[in-house]
Image (spheres, grey):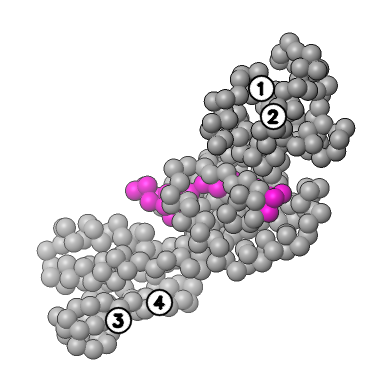
Amino acid sequence: MVDNLYTELNDRSKLIFKKLVESYLETGSPAGSETIMKMGGFNLSSASIRTILSNLQKEGLLFAPHRSAGRMPTEKGMRFFVDGLLEFGRISKSDMENIKQQCSTKDKSYEEVLNLASKTISGLSNYAGIVIAPKFQKNLKHLEFIRLNKSQLMLILAYENGEIENRIIEDKGAYNNNFLIQASNYLTSKFNNKNITQIKKEIQVDIQKSQNKLEIISSKLVQQGIIQNQPKPNNPYIFLHGQSNLLKDEIISKDLDQIRSLFDEIEKKSSFVEILENAGRAKGVQIFIGSKNFLFKHSGLSMVMAPYKNNEQEIIGAIGVVGPTRLNYSKIVPLVDYTSKIIGKVID
């Protein structure tokens, strides 16, 4: 529907609409024909501009909060602007260096890097910064195979943060207890302090290059238990900074119940699995606006989100900014995009 509108509207209407939205993003206030005339860029009378604004309102792109106060973009209008009229700015060199420095892995754990990334993007955007990562990125501390019955093994995975996971492997009784002990010891020493992504890379190489029977079979068992049976991120890491920045927006601050609901959702973490799934289907930065935002369902909120990937271009998490619909998209979209690429490089 928005795509059809973009084709149907003439260049003059698009330009006037673009000017009005840019005024709204800068001031947060409605704009009328006089305001748009002062912005310049076209040779039209105030009456002609009012007619165009009226037609844009009929198309559902604008609304008038008060009879004589000018017009503002609707959620549909913001979507139209973002999809077809938004011009992205460039990230300053100082911001780039700030992101690189804060997201460096030197003397930092995986979790510390993601926490600092959230804090940094919040500071640069002046809104809430959020980073989401599947829990299976945590580092392994110990691995052990135990015979459950004649046809099944249990793979026990103990992580450095104290969490333990169990996986069931079907082996039809192929391996005795002595071999399972040897395999457990060998794999623990090999994969200690490595995460699932790192293990996945090494396993493929081991299976192809190993000549030793213990190494080959152990690697295949790990592949079956860890990679083929990889867990869903039902309880992902969530790093959130700058929540108080949301209350600076006049529209959002009027609805504190919705803000509390948003923070409750973040605490529960359940909905963020959906963010990771959406990020996995995305080719780049996604913009979720107002009530069309699949997570927050808040007419005053928007989210700019991008996946971050490893060297194999696999999605390993997502980073974004949460703020009012009146976000500075031209600044924040490239900011989120750049930060997602830096994180993907440093934590791979």
Residue at image location 25% in from the left, 61% down from the top:
203
Q: Which residue is mark 2?
A: 56
Residue 154 is tagged as 3
Q: Residues within 10 Å of mark 2 (few under 14, many from 20)?
A: many
Relative to the observer, which residue lies in front, 323 or 47? Answer: 47
Q: On the rendered image, what quadrant is the N terminus found in?
A: top right
Lower position in the chain sequence, tag 1 or tag 4: 1
Q: Secondary structure at mark 3?
A: strand
CA–CA distance in space, label 4 to label 3: 10 Å
Lower position in the chain sequence, tag 4 or tag 3: 3
Q: What segment carries the magenta color?
A: 298-317
Question: Which corner quadrant of the image does residue 159 belong to?
Answer: bottom left
Q: Within the magenta stretch, is there residue 310?
A: yes
Q: Which residue is mark 4?
A: 165
Question: CB atoms at circles 2 and 3 under 8 Å apart?
Answer: no
Relative horizontal placement of residue 228, taking residue 236 as reference (left or right): left
* Amino acid type, residue under disc 3 in the picture: Met
Q: Residues within 10 Å of mark 1 (few under 14, many from 20)?
A: some
Give how far across and how far down residue 338 sits, in percent: 53, 40
CA–CA distance in space, label 1 to label 4: 58 Å
Q: Would residue 339 be seen by someone viewing this image from the given angle?
A: no
Question: CB atoms at circles 3 and 1 under 8 Å apart?
Answer: no
Residue at image location 43% in from the left, 49% down from the top:
281
Residue 13 is tagged as 1
CA–CA distance in space, label 3 to label 1: 65 Å
